[in-house]
């Protein structure tokens, strides 16, 4: 690249770690012990950070760069760099800019240019795996010719690791949820319900992350202009080679026209001929620019097809993961429906039992009322002169109460209140 760069300075991790640890647990003013101070938060936007630079040969280097240099070097606005800040939580995003591709996919946050990858330095497993795998692939491709540009290889690895990570999390969650749901279907308890509620929350959070990656890839596949912006190698080659080769004849034509116009006075015929020369020069310039734009559009069309095939491959992978999570959510919903059906069945059984008890209580109340009446002392009642009369009253009353209870059961069966 033709522009001059400020020298990179290697970043000493041990010194930075010790300095951060000494300043982190100080209690300053209204600060809180163990947390970042307000002064540190104000200065963090202007200070340098540790970055990992990976070039086209696969060589890695740890650098200390500030945001201003990265913005100038990659021609990025400040809002794009906020996507790379680990303290800010943003959804997965892939942005194509003039000189760079900004990637924020889960823990992989990097800037891809035509000849290097600037990766946020972190001890996260995804970042370490991305750095080592990209270096390995770039170094192995030195012996083997690869038609894929550098930025596409870096983008492909970021998509591959992200899709693999999300799919692994989906499989792990799937292996954990299915036994819990089967246990809950067989034994409904508060403990099992709490476990399912916790796992369902994890499932919804993972589904949102997978859905965002799915939508981002789909948005890129639907927008040809965004895909054309991501072919950084072609734009770099065109910007370096176009001004030298295509404008020589036109500039000479304009120079001749300009010098001829500054010569001695000419006749109207000569002036008309000069106008025709200018028109011819303008038409040649227009045709050459159209030809160049046609070539660039045809090349970008081929590149769009190449990038679209790359995105489509990982779109299928992330769509499979999303469908797996959707199936898991449907299984949870089906289990919840089954539990609701079981609870409704138990509730119906309780209502039926309560109805039977209520009918029996009504009949027993009638029997008790009759016996209570005959338990009173009535004056001049001839029935008390027969000792066996009270026994017959109890027998007849019990028979009538039994017949009444049986009538209730027949009525309930007729009305299909509950099967008998």
Image: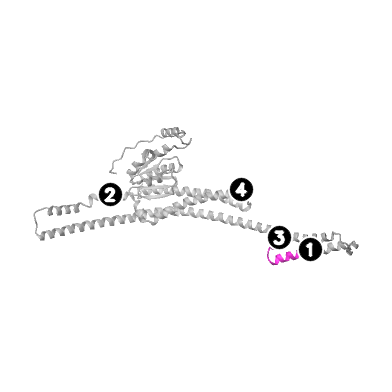
User: 74 above or below 29?
Assistant: below
Q: Which labelled disc corresponds to residue 289?
A: none
Outermost bottom residue = 414
3D distance between C-alphas at marks 2 and 3: 88 Å
Query: Quick one: 391 or 334, which is closer to the camera?
Result: 391
Which residue is tagged 2? Answer: 239
Q: CA distance from mark 1 to mark 3?
A: 17 Å
The image quadrant of residue 56 is top left
In the image shown, does 353 or 200 lie closer to the viewer?
353
The relative height of residue 326 versus residue 12 in the rendered view (above or below) is below
Image x and y of residue 358, in percent: 73, 59
Q: Is residue 337 magenta?
A: no
> Does residue 409 belong to the magenta stretch?
yes
- Secondary structure of the residue carrying tag 4 is helix
Can you tell which of label 3 and label 4 is closer to the viewer?
3
Which residue position holds label 4?
A: 191
Label 3 residue SS: helix
Q: Residue at x 46, y 42 (%)?
A: 125
Q: Helix or strand or loop: what does disc 2 sit on?
A: helix
Query: Predominant secondary structure in magenta?
Result: helix
Q: Of marks 3 and 4, which one's residue comes earlier in the chain? A: 4
What crowding class fits label 3: few (fewer than 14 Cα within 10 Å), some (14-19), or many (20 or more)?
some
Q: Which mark is residue 401?
A: 1
Q: Earlier in the sequence, mark 4 or mark 1?
A: 4
What stretch of residues is rendered in magenta?
401-420
Q: Which residue is mark 3?
A: 355
| Label 1: few (<14), some (14–19) or many (≥20) C-alpha neighbours in 10 Å | some
The residue at the point 69 percent across, 60 percent down is: 352
- In the image as oriented, which residue stretches furthest toward the front? 379
């Amino acid at each position: 690249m033709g522009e001059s760069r400020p020298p990179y300075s290697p970043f000493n991790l041990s010194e930075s770690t010790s300095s951060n640890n000494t300043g982190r647990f100080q209690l300053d003013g209204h600060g809180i012990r163990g947390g970042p101070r307000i002064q540190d938060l104000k200065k963090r936007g202007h200070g340098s950070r540790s970055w990992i630079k990976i070039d086209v040969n696969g060589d890695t280097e740890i650098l200390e760069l500030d945001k201003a240099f990265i913005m100038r070097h990659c021609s990025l606005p400040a809002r794009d760099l906020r996507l790379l800040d680990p303290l800010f939580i943003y959804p997965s995003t892939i942005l194509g800019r003039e000189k760079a591709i900004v990637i924020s996919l889960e823990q992989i946050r990097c800037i891809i240019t035509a000849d290097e990858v600037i990766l946020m330095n972190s001890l996260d497993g995804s970042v370490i795996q991305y750095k080592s795998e990209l270096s390995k692939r770039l170094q192995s491709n030195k012996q083997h010719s690869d038609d894929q540009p550098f930025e596409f290889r870096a983008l492909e690895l970021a998509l591959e690791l992200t899709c693999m990570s999300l799919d692994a999390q989906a499989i792990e969650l799937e292996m954990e949820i299915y036994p819990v749901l089967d246990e809950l279907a067989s034994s409904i308890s508060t403990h099992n319900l709490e476990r399912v509620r916790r796992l369902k929350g994890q499932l919804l959070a993972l589904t949102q992350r997978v859905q965002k990656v799915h939508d981002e890839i789909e948005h890129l596949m639907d927008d040809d202009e965004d895909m054309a912006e991501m072919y950084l190698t072609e734009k770099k080659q065109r910007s370096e080679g176009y001004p030298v080769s295509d404008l020589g004849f036109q500039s000479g034509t304009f120079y001749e026209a300009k010098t001829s116009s500054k010569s001695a006075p000419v006749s109207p015929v000569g002036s008309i001929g000069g106008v025709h020369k200018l028109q011819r020069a303008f038409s040649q310039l227009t045709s050459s620019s159209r030809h160049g734009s046609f070539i660039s559009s045809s090349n970008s069309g081929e590149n769009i097809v190449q990038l679209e095939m790359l995105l489509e491959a990982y779109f299928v992978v992330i769509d499979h993961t999303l469908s797996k999570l959707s199936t898991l959510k449907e299984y949870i919903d089906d289990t919840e429906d089954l539990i609701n059906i079981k609870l409704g069945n138990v509730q119906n059984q309780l209502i039926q039992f309560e109805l039977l008890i209520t009918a029996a209580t009504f009949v027993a109340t009638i029997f008790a009322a009759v016996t209570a009446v005959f338990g009173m002392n009535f004056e001049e009642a001839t029935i008390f002169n027969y000792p066996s009369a009270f026994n017959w009253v109890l027998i007849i009353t019990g028979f009538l109460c039994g017949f009444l209870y049986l009538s209730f059961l027949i009525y309930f069966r007729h009305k299909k209140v509950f099967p008998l």
